[in-house]
Amino acid sequence: MSHTADRESGQVVARALRPYGTSIFTEMTDLAITHGAVNLSQGFPDFDGPEEIRREVLPRKGAIIQTKSVRSTGSDELFAQREAQRCLQCSYICNKCVEVCPNRANVVISVPVEAGFGQDEQIVHIDALCNECGNCATFCPWNGKPYKDKFTVFNLREDFDNSENDGFLIEGESAVVRLNGAVRSLPLNEEGSIESDELDSRVSAMIETIVHKHAYLLGEVDR
Ligand code: SF4
Ligand code: SF4
C-alpha cells in the first residue's frame, strides 16, 4: 500500500472510530495505572513482569537444553524432574500448548505436589486426539515439541507401539509404561494405584491421577 493510500485508510478508520470516543484500550490502561494492576487488555502484559517471577522464569528457560541430555541418560528420575520443572503454568507466561491445540490434545491435570512436583498443574498429551499439526511446537516458548515431549496418554496398543513418546496405556489390569524407551507393564491394585516402586513417584502420581480423576481419557478409541 502506498503512503498516501495508507494515510487515507488510517483517516477512514479514525473517522469511523470517532463516535465511540475513548477506546477500551485507553480506558483499561488508565485503570491499570490507577490501581497498579496487570494490564492484559491488549492481549499481553505491557511490562516485563514482577522481578520474582522473572527470577523463576529465566533459569527454567535454560532447562530446555537439559531436556535433550536428560533423555539420553535413560533415567526415570531425571525425566520426572524435568517434567516437574520445565513448564510455567502462570496463565500469562505459558500454557500455550494447551491453548493453541485445535484438537484439545494437550490438557492440564492437577497432580499432588507431595509426589515431588514443584507445582500441582502438569500437562499431559492425548495421543488419540493429536493429528501432529505441530502448532504446539511452534508456540512453545521452550522450543520444545509438546506433542512429542509431554507424558502421553495412549488409548490403543498399536498407537503406543508406533510412538516413541514417554507415556502409558491401560491394558487390562495393568499400566503399560514407556520411559526413555524402556517399556514395562505394572499391575494396578483395586484402587487403581501402582504398587511397584519401579517408577519415580512423580510418574506414578501422573498415571494414578489420570486413572482416578480423568478416566474419560482412557479406554479404546476408533482407529
Ligand atoms: S501437534 Fe497435536 S497436540 Fe500439538 S497442536 Fe497439533 S494436534 Fe495439538
Ligand atoms: S507451550 Fe511449552 S513451555 Fe508452555 S506449557 Fe506447553 S510445553 Fe510447557
Image (spheres, rainbow, N blue to C red):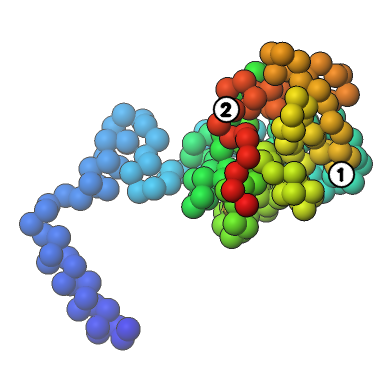
Residue 1 is situated, as x and y percent measured from the top left of the image, at 32, 83
Image quadrant of residue 120? top right
Secondary structure beneath disc 2? loop
136 lies above or below 210: below
The residue depicted at 81 percent of the width and 23 percent of the height is: 187
Question: Within 10 Å of the Cα at label 1, are there few (<14), some (14-19), or many (20+) other Cα atoms?
Answer: some
Q: Nearer the viewer, residue 69 or 168?
A: 168
Q: Nearer the viewer, residue 124 or 77?
A: 124
Amino acid at dot 1: Gly
- Badge 2 or badge 1: first in the primary sequence: 1
Q: Which residue is mark 1?
A: 181
The residue depicted at 27 percent of the width and 79 percent of the height is: 6
114 lies above or below 72: above
Answer yes or no: is residue 208 visible: yes
Secondary structure beneath disc 1? loop
Relative to 190, 131 lies left or right: left
Residue 214 disc label: 2
Residue 34 is situated, as x and y percent measured from the top left of the image, at 28, 32
Furthest residue in direction right, as rendered: 73
Image quadrant of residue 205? top right
